[in-house]
Amino acid sequence: MKLLPASILAAALILNAFGENPQASIDGTAPGWRAMTEEDFTAVNCKPETWTFHKDGTINCTGKPVGVIRTKKELTNFELVLEWRHNKPAGNSGVFVWAIPSSIKTLEAGQGRLPQGIEVQVLDLAYGGKNPADWYTSHGDVFPVGAAKMTPFAPVAPNGKRSFPSAKTTKGVGEWNHYYIRAINGEVRLWVNGTEVSGGTNCKPATGFLCLESEGSPIDFRNLRLRELP
């Protein structure tokens, strides 16, 4: 059998992953996906007891102190699947898909609490009460933090920086929510509970660390799965 050049194989993999039916890989069980474990992450500026990894794939986070854990390696093009649930009303957390390495070093040196980069918001519906501020929502905002840049997909927040979700599909406190995040060539797209809702393009940086946030309230994650792409 004649082998295809690496460039053609890479293109074929991307087309398979990002074709007309992205729902096909939303559960993270297609070829190339793998489970993420404690071995994938390292501490940044949280306490040892902040994060607890269990053999069944569940991760408990106390929310205190505010900070992050990060992947041991930087990522560029990838897909990520995870589930999350807040354990108290008005819980706040997030996922950084491309956290800037220099900002991580600052945190590791004991300065600051959260990194700079592209963040995918994880908010409970009760955050901010029944009338959230006009600059955020509780249904999966995607936005740049600090020195990061991004052109948000519509609808766009009044401040012009955030991609607001086009649909409200998030479940409330105590219920599991499913995120499928696609990050490739400087573009981020987010599906919440099976529906694509938000994202952005022209992201800078378009490579960096994947981080999970501890942001003041207890939250659980589970079933983290990753597929790295060319």
Image: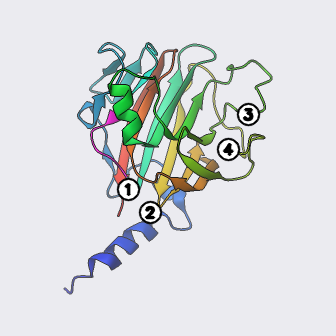
Question: Which mark sits nearer the N-terminus, 3 or 4?
Answer: 3
Please identify, in this view, whether the residue under mark 3 or under mark 2 is nearer the observer: 3
Q: Amino acid at mark 2?
A: Ala
Q: Nearer the viewer, mark 4 or mark 2?
A: 4
The one of 109 and 227 positioned closer to us in this rendering: 109
Reply yes or no: does residue 223 show up in magenta. Answer: no
Find the magenta span and give its range.
69-75
Residue 3, located in which quarter of the rendered image?
Answer: bottom left
Of the numbered discs 4 and 1, the one sitting upstream in the chain is: 1
What residue is disc 3 on?
A: 135
Earlier-in-chain disc, 2 versus 1: 2
Task: Tell me which numbered mark, 3 or 2, is placed earlier along the sequence.
Answer: 2
**Residue 143 quadrant:** top right
- In contact (CB < 8 Å): disc 2 and disc 1: yes
Q: Secondary structure at mark 3?
A: loop
Residue 74 part of the magenta segment: yes
The residue wearing badge 1 is: 30
Mark 1 neighbour density, 10 Å: few (under 14) some (14–19) many (20 or more): few
Calculate the distance from the C-alpha at mark 2 to the C-alpha at mark 1.
9 Å
Residue in the picture at 27% in, 76% down: 6
Q: The residue under label 1 is which amino acid type? A: Ala
Q: Of the numbered discs in the image, which one, if any, rests on residue 17?
A: 2
Amino acid at dot 3: Trp
Q: Which residue is mark 4?
A: 161
How much space separates mark 3 and mark 1, taking CA atoms? 36 Å
**CA distance separating discs 4 and 1:** 33 Å
Of labels 3 and 1, earlier in sequence is: 1
Image position, residue 173 (x, y; %): 60, 20
Determine contact: label 4, label 1, CB under 8 Å: no
